[in-house]
Image: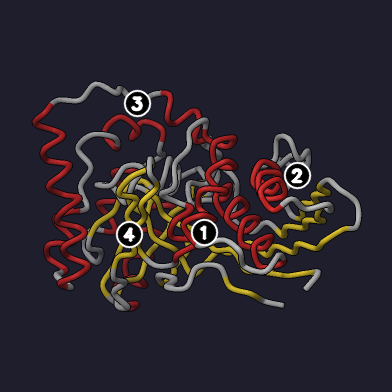
Amino acid sequence: MKKITISVPSSVANVSCGFDVLGFCLDKPCDEMTVEIKKTKGLEIKIINEKSITTDPKNNVCGPVAFAMIKKLNLNHGFHITIIKKIKPGSGIGSSAASAAGMAFAINYLTGNTFSKLELVKFAMLGEEIASGAKHADNLSPVIFGGFTLVRSLNPLNIISLPTIEELYVIITHPLIELKTKDSRQIINKQISLEKAIQQWGNLGGFVASLYTKDYELLSKSIDDVIIEPQRLKLIPNFKEIVDAASKYSLGSGISGAGPSIFSICKGEKNAELAMDTIRKITDKKKLEYNLILSGVNKDGIKIIN
């Protein structure tokens, strides 16, 4: 194999109660990524549909991932990379994670599948560090493993695949503004009270338990962030109105990743469609433009197209 084309999905990180540790993979939107071995060393990156992303390998998230893998594998060649970008940068649904994860997956496949999924996340974290200023794996893990994942530890890296409930559907409400993860992280006050920490641990434990037991009532109660979201709400246009509108049909809503997108988890596609209709009534009244996406939970992660 000298060339591979893959579909790399978007993802929701944090999921309210699991800041930097919990995430799940979406069926859509997905980037299309083609990686081809070239005879000479170095990387050539081409981005289609998005002019704001640099193609300089030193500053593009694909660069550090590829360079680290090339060094580890002692390769004497480089790669051509073409990305048809469908996951909007700064949208809060893992645009940079998709590119970093896709890069790791593609190189691994083209060089004989030497590395495990866990090792691919480690490589991809080098790209996420460029995008957000910190190594984190809550978007990367579901993209590479599929479904819901829990990052139990970063050092050593320990990722747990959680059950995926097929009845869950998700609405992504994306105000068409860009919110960089680096900027969104800078406003967070790292000093938290013990009381709030205990509440958050309880919600995270409850959410994980709900996936194993398919307890929708517990899942709904657990989608509650008492630490990070209260600090970020001012960055999200019409957050309260949208969450309130979705609440009649959704199990819960929250900020997707660093925002500005809002996720709303629903039981069944019909409830998701009804939730999206109620959200649309709110967004249609506002001056800001919004994209509304209805997606299932992607159990497989990255898929090979060709």
Mark 4 secondary-structure assignment:
strand
Front: mark 2 or 4: 4
Quarter of the view holding residue 294? bottom left
Does 273 appear above or below 31? below
SS state under label 1: strand
Judge the density around disc 1: few (<14), some (14-19), many (≥20) Cα neighbours within 10 Å. many
Q: Say what amino acid the circle numbered 1 marks.
A: Ser
Q: Residue at x 64, y 46 (%)?
A: 65
- Is the residue 81 above or below the residue 179 in the image? below
Residue for point 71% across, 42% down: 53
For the C terminus, the image quarter is: bottom right
| Residue at image mark 3 | 188
Give the x, y percent position of residue 73. 69, 53
**Looking at the image, which residue is at 11% across and 28% down?**
194
**Residue named by callout 4:** 160
Residue 10 got which mark? 1
- Determine whether the residue tagged by mark 3 lies in a helix, strand or loop: loop
Residue under pointer 2: 51
| Mark 3–mark 4 CB contact (< 8 Å) | no
